[in-house]
Every structure is written in C-alpha cells, then in structure tokens.
Image (cartoon, helix red, strand yellow):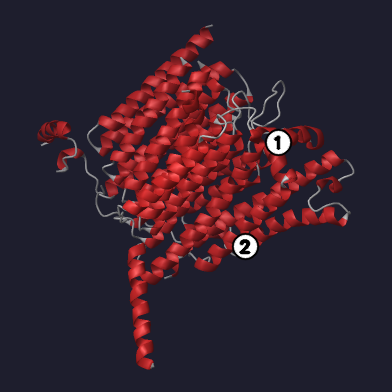
C-alpha cells in the first residue's frame, strides 16, 4: 500500500507541475508551487519510511518550514511589486 | 540496457547542464542568465553526488550493523560548494542591481548598445579635441 | 519491489528536473522563472536524499530552495523589470551546446556504472576517511568529521569566501537604513501564525547546529536556518522592526567573529607545536580534543554563515528605502 | 495486525485525496476554485498520510517529530491559502464567471451557465 501512496504522490507532483507551467495567472503558479512543496514533504515522509532514508523526518520538518517561508516571501515581494494584470 | 540504466543519471545530468548553458547563452536578460548558471551548478552537484552513491550503501553516518557506506567525500565538497555558490550568486545579483541603476536596463543587448554609443561619443570627442 | 521503487523515484525526479529546466528556459516572466528555480532546488534535494547524501539534501533545501529564492526575489523587486525577459533563439548557441553535450556524453560512456562499489572513486580516500573517523574522531557523522577535521583547511577557505561575498555585497549595495513603520494594511492571521513559527525555526536551527555530529546537519545548514527565522520576521512584520532586533551594523562584526573563531582554533593548535587546525592539541585526550575542535569550528561556521546570510538579505532589502 | 491494516487504510485514503486535489488543481476553471480544490484536500491528505506512517513506525522520537510536522502543515496550509486568496482578491483577480478570459474552451460553456444563474 505504501508503494501505491508513493506512486499517487508522484502523479500528484506531475499534475501540480503542469498547473505551475500552464498558469495562466501568477497566483495560480504560486498556489501550484506551494502545493508542490507540500506534496514533496509528504513524499519525503512516505518514501523515506519505505526506502529507509536516514533521518528523513528532520529533512521533512525543514522542508515544511522552508516551504512556508518561501511561499510567504514570494507573496510578500509580489505584493510589493504591484502586479499589472495577468501574465502569460 | 544495462549500460543505459547504469548511465541514465549521467546522461540526464549532462542534458540539464546543457540546458543551463543554453540559458546562459540564449537569454539576454542578466537575471535569467544567473538562473541558467544556477541550473548548471545544480546539475554539477547532482553529478558529484551520483559518483558517491554505492548501490547497497547507506548514508555515511556510522550506525551499527551497516558495512557499506556511500562515499562521504563528494558530499563534503558539494555541501560547501552549495553555500559558496549562493554567496557568489548574491554578489552577481548585487552587480545586476547596480547595472540596472546605471544603465536602466537588465538586458545584455541594450547594455552593449549603450556601451557602443558611449565609445563612439568618446572617440568623437577625442578626435574633436585633437 | 524496493529496488523498483528506487528506480521509479529516481526516474520521476530526473524527469521533473528536466521539465522544470525546460519551462524555466521558455518562460519570459522572471518572477515565475525564480519560483521554478525554487522547486528545481527542492527536487534536486529530494534526489540527493535518494542518493544517500543526507547532509547535502539538507543544505540544498535550506540554501537553494529557501535562501536563494528569497534573494533572487528581493533583487527582482529592486530591479523592477520582471516581464518580457528577451529570449533570442541562437542557432550558434544551440550548436555550441550540442557540441559540448555530445563531447561530455562521449566522455561519460567510459564511466563505471552508477552505484558500482569497485569504481575508482570508491577505492581511495573514502574508506580511509570512514575508518579513521571511527578510530580517531569517534562521531557518527563522517561528513561532519571530514568537513571540520580532515579537510579543515578547505572549509576554512570556504568560510572566508562566504565572508568576503558578504563584504562584497555590502560594498556594492550598502546595508541601508529602514525606519520601522506600521503598514496601513496588515494581515492579522499571518501575524498570529508566524510568531510561534519563528520560535520553532530558531529552535530547529540550534538543533541542527548541535546535532550535526550525530545526524544530518552542521554549521552551514544551521546558519541559514537561523537566518531564515529572522528573514521570516522581516517579511511579515516589516524590515524596520527586524533591524531593531538584529541591527545591520552588528552583522559584519559577527561574520568576522565567526571566521575569527575558526582561525583562532587553528592558531591554538599551532601554538602548542602541532600543525594548523590539528585539534588533538586542544585537550589532553586526542578524541575529546577532536570533539571540542569540531564543536568550535562548527560554531564559527554557523555564526559566519548566519550573519553573512542575514547581512546579504538586509543589503538587498535596504536599497530601495534609501531614496 | 489491526494497526497495519489501519495504516494501510490511512495511506490509501491519503493517496486518493492527494490525487483528487491534484486533479482539481488541474481541471477546475478559475483560480478560487482551484485554490479550494488544492488546499482543502491537502489539509486532509497530509495528516492521513503522516498518521499512516506513524502507525507503522510505532512510538519513537521520529513519530513525535511527525506530530510536529502535522501541526506545522495543518497550521501553515490554511494560512498560506488565506494570504494567497486575500492577495489575489486585492489585486483584482475575479472569479471566472465575470472575466472574458477564454483559456479553456470546455469550461467556457459551464461558466456562462453559472454566470447566468448568478445574475
């Protein structure tokens, strides 16, 4: 079952990536990138447990924190930049 | 088939490296060039780490009842290289900020045009002075 | 089954990397390209984890995905122009890239297979390092031992490089000055959520710093994580308030102090007639001397990296407010 | 035995929910509905998957850290979603029914219908 979860997560990552590429709006991309980060944390935990990666929990913890800080930074700077409509 | 599977990582890494190189060559925007450089850098990191991997090995952190450890040396080299890489990237970004202030553009072609114009003017001025 | 999973994850991650790099080439919006580079680093770190490089994955996630994204974004905020990054289709460039790639692939075919235990890289130095770590230094994490003790010179050089990069950014941009001012429109939810998060990040930074001997971690990673706690504070509450907590003027001194701690540790061993950075001189017992040396050196590295990273962030965030 | 069965169920449900979320993120017509699709499933799938792993590892230091990760994710995801939604609303991103953006043709007819209904 753990293999099924890993494969589901990999497919999820691929789909999220497609949304990040398609856009169309910058906020869609931010959402997709943030979602990609969260799914990566889950993948680390599940795959790390299945494959026996060393101290995967520490790294997952750090990914979760970095993802939070990174997404906040993206939004913060984008607000300051003052967007002019939608980008392609 | 064995050959392909054994070298798969290397081929992809080289492909990535070349993508980074193409980004540096083909985009005239300086920040884009820097991103390309970082992609190149990251693919070199992956190449090094791939060298260090041993199939049945475990991470080089000594634990009981493990005999085979992956090679710790590439890890050390790359660990410091990552931090140094970001430090140098930050210097590059600072330079770009200053270039943007001086020229009003981050585009390599525009900057070259302006430089050429400046050279032309200074030459003209010199010839007039002479 | 497990081997297949390894292979599937490996192939998927590499495919993601290629896709992300391809999109980063195509996209003209620099903002989006930066974000894509952020997830590129994330995926690369995941790949490192799969290739047994725990410490490298840690560093890449903290530095590559976290700090360098923040850095590029703040640089983009300063330069303003984030759209229509011109992209010229250069046939010559494509030719050069193709030629280089073909040459490299030709070179790679001679490599031993991936994961081969008898490859030349695995036979020299690495087994000695692993054996010597168990015998002379007696800490579990071989990477930390090699980093701080066996290759201490190298790491000293890297620390100095980071310090000088910080100085270079400071010279180019100045540290700036930002008055603390409340922005009219504040997000209460963020304020409340972020406060415990900052505490968590700082504690986690300390854990990584001091747990580096036993598991993944060390000075480089801890410095960046610790700094990202303050960066989070600056992002949410305003840069002026962050500068009240950690003044910009103190940071160059801290960075210099970090390098100094490293250097003085080396000098102490020099004074007691041992080679530079030979930690056996620090204590009567060689093993505990090594422990103490690694602790000091990692503390120096952590301090230097923390202050340099925060200094660079301050420099980039301070420029615009000067005008 | 029961514990491993429970863990399997958690992992399976978590996998299904992440997949649903991703399909929602890809297929839904406008930003706000995509936000909804991604974030709600995320908040459910993350604890499910992590609890599934925790049941398998048993009571160790690792499972304590995993609890911490659950707390981080359950707190940070809605916060990010809220901030993102707020920023998008401030910058003038409107729900699909009012824009004339015709990115996805198959969704266009649906939005027209919903637009009429809202009027």
* Residue situated furthest bottom in the rendering: B130
Query: From what the image shows, is residue A18 above or below residue C24?
Result: above
Query: From what the image shows, is residue C89 above or below residue B45?
Result: below
The label nearer to you, 1 versus 2, is 1
Q: Which of B11 and D29 is in front in this view?
A: B11
Whether residue C40 is visible: no
Q: Which residue is drawn at 52% across and 31% down?
A: D69
Dot label at residue C124: 1
Q: Which residue is drawn at 28% across and 49% down?
A: D90
Dot label at residue B95: none
How many residues crowd around disc 2 within 10 Å: few (fewer than 14), some, or many (20 or more)?
A: many
D28 displayed left or right of C255: left
N-terminal of the pair, mark 1 or mark 2, is 1
Quarter of the C terminus of chain B within the rendering = bottom left
Whether residue C106 is visible: yes
Q: Are marks 1 and 2 on the same chain?
A: yes
Dot label at residue C252: 2
Q: Residue at x 45, y 69 (%)?
A: C322
């Amino acid at each position: 079952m753990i293999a099924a979860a890993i494969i589901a997560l990999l497919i999820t990552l691929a789909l999220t990536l497609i949304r990040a590429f398609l856009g169309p709006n910058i906020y869609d991309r931010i959402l997709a990138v943030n979602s990609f980060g969260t799914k990566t944390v889950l993948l680390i935990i599940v795959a790390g447990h299945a494959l026996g990666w060393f101290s995967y929990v520490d790294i997952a913890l750090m990914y979760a924190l970095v993802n939070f800080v990174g997404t906040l930074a993206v939004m913060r700077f984008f607000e300051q930049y003052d967007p002019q409509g939608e980008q392609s | 088939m064995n050959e392909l599977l054994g070298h798969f990582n290397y081929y992809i890494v080289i492909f990535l490296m070349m993508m980074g190189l193409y980004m540096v060559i083909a985009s005239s925007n300086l920040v884009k060039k820097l991103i390309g450089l970082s992609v190149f850098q990251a693919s070199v990191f992956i190449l090094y780490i791939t060298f260090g991997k041993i199939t049945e090995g475990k991470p080089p952190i000594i634990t009981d009842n493990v005999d085979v450890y992956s090679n710790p040396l590439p890890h050390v080299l790359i660990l410091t290289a990552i931090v140094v890489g970001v430090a140098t990237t930050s210097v590059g970004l600072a330079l770009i900020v200053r270039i943007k202030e001086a020229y009003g553009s981050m585009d390599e072609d525009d900057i070259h045009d302006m430089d050429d114009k400046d050279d032309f003017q200074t030459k003209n001025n010199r010839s007039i002075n002479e | 089954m497990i081997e297949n999973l390894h292979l599937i994850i490996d192939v998927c991650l590499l495919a993601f990397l290629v896709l992300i790099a391809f999109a980063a080439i195509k996209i003209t919006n620099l903002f989006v390209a930066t974000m894509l580079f952020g997830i590129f680093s994330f995926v690369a770190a995941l790949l490192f984890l799969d290739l047994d490089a725990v410490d490298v994955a840690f560093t890449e996630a903290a530095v590559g995905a976290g700090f360098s994204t923040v850095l590029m974004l703040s640089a983009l905020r300063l330069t303003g122009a984030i759209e229509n990054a011109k992209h010229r289709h250069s046939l010559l460039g494509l030719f050069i890239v193709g030629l280089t790639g073909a040459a490299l692939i030709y070179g790679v075919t001679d490599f031993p297979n991936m994961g081969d235990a008898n490859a030349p890289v695995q036979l020299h130095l690495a087994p000695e390092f692993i054996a010597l770590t168990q015998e002379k230094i007696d800490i579990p994490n071989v990477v930390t031992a090699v980093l701080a003790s066996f290759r201490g010179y190298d790491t000293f050089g890297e620390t100095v490089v980071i310090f000088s990069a910080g100085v270079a950014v400071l010279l180019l941009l100045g540290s700036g000055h930002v008055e603390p001012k409340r922005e009219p429109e504040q997000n209460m939810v963020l304020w409340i959520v972020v406060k415990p998060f900052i505490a968590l990040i700082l504690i986690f930074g300390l854990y990584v710093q001091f747990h580096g001997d036993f598991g993944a971690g060390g000075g480089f990673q801890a410095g960046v994580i610790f700094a990202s706690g303050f960066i989070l504070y600056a992002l949410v509450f305003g840069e002026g308030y962050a500068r009240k907590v950690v003044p910009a003027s103190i940071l160059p001194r801290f960075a210099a102090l970090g390098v100094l701690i490293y250097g003085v540790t080396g000098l102490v061993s020099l004074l007691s007639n041992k080679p530079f950075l030979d930690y056996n001189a620090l204590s009567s017992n060689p093993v505990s001397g090594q422990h103490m040396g690694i602790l000091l050196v990692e503390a120096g590295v952590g301090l230097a990296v923390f202050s340099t990273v925060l200094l660079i962030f301050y420099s980039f965030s301070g420029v615009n407010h000067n005008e | 035995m029961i514990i491993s069965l429970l863990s399997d169920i958690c992992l399976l449900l978590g996998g299904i929910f992440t997949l649903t979320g991703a399909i929602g993120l890809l297929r839904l017509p406008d930003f706000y509905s995509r936000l909804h699709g991604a974030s709600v499933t995320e908040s459910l799938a993350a604890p499910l998957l992590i609890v599934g792993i925790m049941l398998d590892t048993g009571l160790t230091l690792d499972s304590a850290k995993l609890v911490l990760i659950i707390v981080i994710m359950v707190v940070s995801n809605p916060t990010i979603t809220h901030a993102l939604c707020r920023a998008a609303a401030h910058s003038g991103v409107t729900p699909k029914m009012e824009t004339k953006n015709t990115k996805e043709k198959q969704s266009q007819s649906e939005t027209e219908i919903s637009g009429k209904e809202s009027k």
